[in-house]
Image: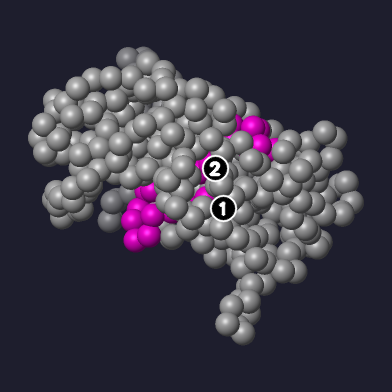
Amino acid sequence: MCRFIEYGSEMEAQKGVGTKYWGVLFVVVIIAVLGTYATVSYLRPGETTTTTNITNSDQSLINSLESQNAQLENELASKSQISNGTVLGLDTVGIYQTDSVGVVTVQGTTSSEGFNSTILGSGFVINFSGSDYIVTNYHVVKDVSGITVTFQDGDAYPAAVVGSDGYSDLAVLNLTAPPSEFHPLTVVSSSTLMVGQPVAAIGNPFGLSGSMTVGIVSQLGRTISESLAGNFSIANVIQFSAAINPGNSGGPLLNANGAVVGITTATVESSQGVGFAIPSDTILRELNSLVTIGSYNMHAYMGISGADMNYQLATLQKTNYTYGVLIESVTSGGPAQMAGLMAGTQTVTVQGSAYLIGGDIIVSINGTKMINTDALSTYLAEYCLPGQTLVLHIIRGGQSMTIDLILGTRPPPPS
């Protein structure tokens, strides 16, 4: 998926502030020149130079105006410094100078039906147990041969995948290069992110290496579909507004301190202002497993597919619950079936979309309200592990009840 955002409104707003101050400064100068009869020499056609004397009162006014000029010049200089060095509250220049050296270009070749094509993505350096690795997206390196990593200085080295997880779209690469090439970025927990918080993305869109864009966190806990994950979705994803394009995948999403809070992974095709990033908590949780055993096998699994409840579905289900997750199907032999959860039995069309109604509605898990499928997927990804027992509050046939469910482990993703 490919997405692009036009950026510049914030800079234009700041530029407008500067223009206002120049306008005020110009007016003050005109007043000083024309309104005080200071020592001004001027020539008119056919006339000689004329000089007007200054009174004590005039001099006081001039001194006052000069003081105002100096104050306005200082304020203008301050505004210029801010607009040139920060955007949306981020020290963009400082972040770029510090972090861009840790962002790399990942390249390789794929083959399909006898045709070879070049892939290009981004990645960044991370240090784990005293060794340096490259973190990128799984979809950047899946089925790719001849992988190379190019650092900011242009030096390139062959690399190999040491671990990957298609369910989280993460991959870790290893390569042999001089220590001076590695500039690890700091990875912090994404749990403190808030909607509206400014973020920056650095990557290589369309091969334009070291490109930086800025935006805000638009929403948290999103769920996106990813073909690499088979029938499963990638949960607990960060939605942000910084412009990213093909080639950005695998690059870091940075907070105001220049620390990694996510890894850019996807965009919405033919839209603007919608990008997605895997949260850094996922990286921190999986890194040890990816490096040491080459995979991550602790994704909790319920074995259901469902849809978001809404007013129309609630009416058809004869319930007052307009939120929750409507269970449309359960996997044979999966945790949900073993727990006795019921799937939908009747196909209906609501606003152009087909649904299977008649099944159970999950409205809370362990006392936590489940507004929709995003909330359920995020809860499983962030708080649950295989083997854990969940207490589900469900609505069945208009009646409220609780069911215990023991989580399983997701089956391996398709190769």
C-beta proximity under 8 Å, tags 2 and 1: yes
Write the residue at 64% across / 72% down.
110
Q: Nearer the viewer, residue 345 or 234?
A: 345
Q: Residue 276 lies in magenta, yes or no? A: yes
Write the residue at 33% across / 49% down.
43
Q: Amino acid at mark 1?
A: Pro
Q: Position of residue 140 (x, y in %)?
A: 61, 59
Q: Nearer the viewer, residue 407 or 320?
A: 407
Q: Position of residue 232 (x, y in %)?
A: 46, 48
Numbered label attached to residue 299: none
Disc 2 element: loop
Residue denoted by label 1: 413
Numbered label attached to residue 410: 2
Magenta stretch, residue numbers: 265-287
Write the residue at 35% across / 53% down.
272
Q: How crowded is the residue under tag 2: few (<14 C-alpha within 10 Å), some, or many (20+)? A: some
